């Protein structure tokens, strides 16, 4: 009888110990968060973020392919954001700095579903080339109230290209005519020109004051001429002519003539078009006043010449009877999430960590760029760029219309340089030379 009681006690003890052991094991096992709500084309079981076990993304691993090279200011800020994000959330983030050539391998890597959660490249390529491999960010952006501090022009363009929001702007850009305000003051110019007639008047006043009105590097001749083409033709017509020919007899002749007139009036600084960055540097040395470029020219000139130009910006002047007098170049290097990422919410949160708040401001300050977060502050020589982007309604691409024909792209770029070199008698001769390419 005693033996039976002893056996019963032993069995009870084993059962209690087993229950305690089971409770201990369960306490140490992270639970699984409910699946996120991906687009219908993306299976929910492939897009779940593990729930926190102490920190929000403990156990989550992310891989990002960056278009920057290690050591660049942007890369340094992203590295700092990564360290802070890992510390705050418990996630592990691997960043591969691929450099500008990332676009040469990215589409194939996404199609092969290589280990990539976040991609970084030009926002147009993300919207048009990679869109079938990118995640729909609409709901996550809405939850983050992204519209309230981002730029509508970029978001609308992303949606137009991809059919949904598939990119988050990281490095916004805007183009136009950047100028030295002190040079304008010396020439007693009190207002930025809005029309072509006003612009020619400004050029003459600068020349009379002993300052060359315009700088021009050969690297950007196609971009500068493209502004004139867009004013006279609009981008859709430019692309049509680029693909099929028929430039002669169109407003392209006047667009080219406008550039030829600037050359003939002596409005370009000596040596233009120079090899980059020789001509743009002449603004820093006080020899020239204006240049057609994107906002990064301000940092380039300041850094290359060791000066602090008092920069201003105005849109390319409107022309009489123009097809698109309101267009302005707007672009962005942007971030997106692969459609097959298993941790899209963590990836999105890391993207927000980079582009907004503290690290968004660091990008603006250290990489000298327009803030991706409009609540942040632009560098002093980019004053007004946030407001210009917020007001922008008609985005203009970087030479897309004259780059659409891959077979002729390089030849046309060279011809644009020749236009600024004064090698064509008039606009009609330039357009005839273009049409000869299609025969």
Image (cartoon, rainbow, N blue to C red):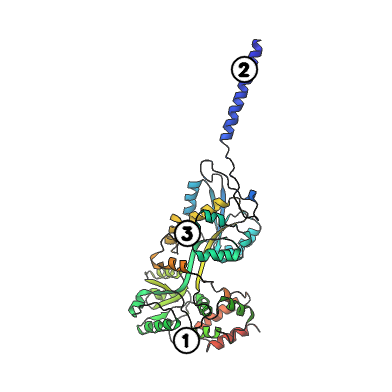
Q: Is residue 280 left or right of residue 47?
A: left
Rendering coords of residue 206 (x, y %): 37, 82
Q: Is residue 432 left or right of residue 367?
A: right
Quadrant in the rendering for residue 288: bottom left
Q: The N terminus is located in which quarter?
A: top right
Point out the frontmost of discs 2 and 3: 3
Visible residue check, residue 71: no
Q: Is residue 198 above or below residue 389?
A: below
Q: The C terminus is located in which quarter?
A: bottom right
Q: Earlier in the sequence, mark 2 or mark 3?
A: 2
Q: CA distance from mark 2 to mark 3?
A: 68 Å
Residue wearing tag 3: 148
Q: Earlier in the sequence, mark 1 or mark 2?
A: 2
For label 2, the SS is: helix
For label 1, the SS is: helix
Residue appearing at x 56%, y 47% in the figure: 60
Visible residue check, residue 199: yes
Point out the frontmost of discs 3 and 1: 3
Rendering coords of residue 325 (x, y %): 49, 77
Q: Is residue 74 above or below residue 57?
A: below
Residue 107 tag number: none
Point out the frontmost of discs 1 and 2: 2
Q: Callout 3: 10 Å neighbours few (<14), some, many (20+)?
A: few
Residue wearing tag 1: 261
Q: Callout 2: 10 Å neighbours few (<14), some, many (20+)?
A: few
Residue wearing tag 2: 9
Q: Earlier in the sequence, mark 3 or mark 1?
A: 3
């Amino acid at each position: 009888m005693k033996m039976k009681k002893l056996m019963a006690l032993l069995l009870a003890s084993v059962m209690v110990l087993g229950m305690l052991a089971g409770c201990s094991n369960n306490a140490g096992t992270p639970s699984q968060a409910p699946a996120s709500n991906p687009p219908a084309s993306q299976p929910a079981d492939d897009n779940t973020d593990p729930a926190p076990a102490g920190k929000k993304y403990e156990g989550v691993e992310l891989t990002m392919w960056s278009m920057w090279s290690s050591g660049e200011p942007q890369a340094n800020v992203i590295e700092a954001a990564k360290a802070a994000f890992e510390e705050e959330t418990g996630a592990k983030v691997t960043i591969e700095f691929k450099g500008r050539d990332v676009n040469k391998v990215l589409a194939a890597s996404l199609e092969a579903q290589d280990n990539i959660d976040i991609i970084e490249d030009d926002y147009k390529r993300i919207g048009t080339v990679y869109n079938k491999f990118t995640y729909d960010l609409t709901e996550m952006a809405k939850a983050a109230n992204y519209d309230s501090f981002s730029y509508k022009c970029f978001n609308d363009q992303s949606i137009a290209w991809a059919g949904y929001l598939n990119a988050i702007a990281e490095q916004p850009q805007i183009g136009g005519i950047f100028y030295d305000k002190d040079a304008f003051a010396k020439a007693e110019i009190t207002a930025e020109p809005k029309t072509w007639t006003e612009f020619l008047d400004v050029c003459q006043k600068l020349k009379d004051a002993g300052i060359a009105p315009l700088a021009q590097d050969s690297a950007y001749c196609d971009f500068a001429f493209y502004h004139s083409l867009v004013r006279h033709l609009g981008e859709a017509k430019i692309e049509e002519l680029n693909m099929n020919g028929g430039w002669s007899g169109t407003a392209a002749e006047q667009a080219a003539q406008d550039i030829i007139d600037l050359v003939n009036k002596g409005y370009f600084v000596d040596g233009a078009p120079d090899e980059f960055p020789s001509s743009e540097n002449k603004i820093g040395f006080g020899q020239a006043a204006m240049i057609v470029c994107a906002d990064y020219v301000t940092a380039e000139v300041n850094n290359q010449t060791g000066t602090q130009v008092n920069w201003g910006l105005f849109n390319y002047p409107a022309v009489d009877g123009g097809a698109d007098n309101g267009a302005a170049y707007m672009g962005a290097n942007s971030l997106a999430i692969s459609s097959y990422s298993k941790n899209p919410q963590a990836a999105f949160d890391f993207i927000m960590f980079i582009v907004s708040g503290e690290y968004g401001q660091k990008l603006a300050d250290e990489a000298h760029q327009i803030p991706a977060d409009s609540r942040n502050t632009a560098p002093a020589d980019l004053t007004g760029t946030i407001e210009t982007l917020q007001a922008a309604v008609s985005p203009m691409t970087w030479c897309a219309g004259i780059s659409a024909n891959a077979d002729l792209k390089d030849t046309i770029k060279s011809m644009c340089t020749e236009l600024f070199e004064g090698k064509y008698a008039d606009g009609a001769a330039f357009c005839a030379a273009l049409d000869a390419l299609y025969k």
